[in-house]
Amino acid sequence: MQVKTIDKQIANCKKQITAIIEKDKELSKKVAYITSIKGVSTITAAIVIGETNGFALINNVKQLVSYVGYDVKEKQSGKQNR
């Protein structure tokens, strides 16, 4: 029973987020651009935009890649395998 209630709350939050995005032209453009990437949902786009203050905190692609954690580099002590 609690799972159904939580699922309804999640659905309601998603509707509210979508409504807010649709009201703002600039935000809608950013979300549309980001969601054009395969596998990126509206909610994911909203989170990224929110956490980066609409990308105002990001100066270049390298910084964004690092921020989201896609610049994974293996670091080990000792000898490196190349």
Image: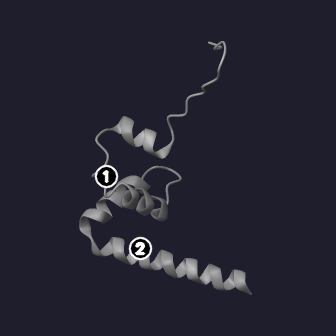
Task: Say left or right for 41 vs 32.
Answer: right
**Residue at figure coordinates x 74%, y 87% from the top left:** 1
Local SS, label 1: loop
Task: Say left or right for 40 vs 62.
Answer: right
**Residue at figure coordinates x 71%, y 80% from the top left:** 3
The answer to whether 71 is drawn above or below residue 22 in the figure is above
The answer to whether 78 is drawn above or below residue 60 in the figure is above
Quarter of the rendering containing residue 23: bottom left
Marks 1 and 2 close (CB-CB < 8 Å)? no
**Residue that carries the numbered disc 1 in the rendered image:** 55
Amino acid beneath label 1: Phe
Q: Residues within 10 Å of mark 2 (few under 14, many from 20)?
A: some
Amino acid beneath label 2: Thr
Local SS, label 2: helix
How many numbered discs, if any? 2
The answer to whether 82 is drawn above or below residue 4 in the figure is above
**Residue at figure coordinates x 41%, y 63% from the top left:** 46
**Residue that carries the numbered disc 2 in the rendered image:** 18
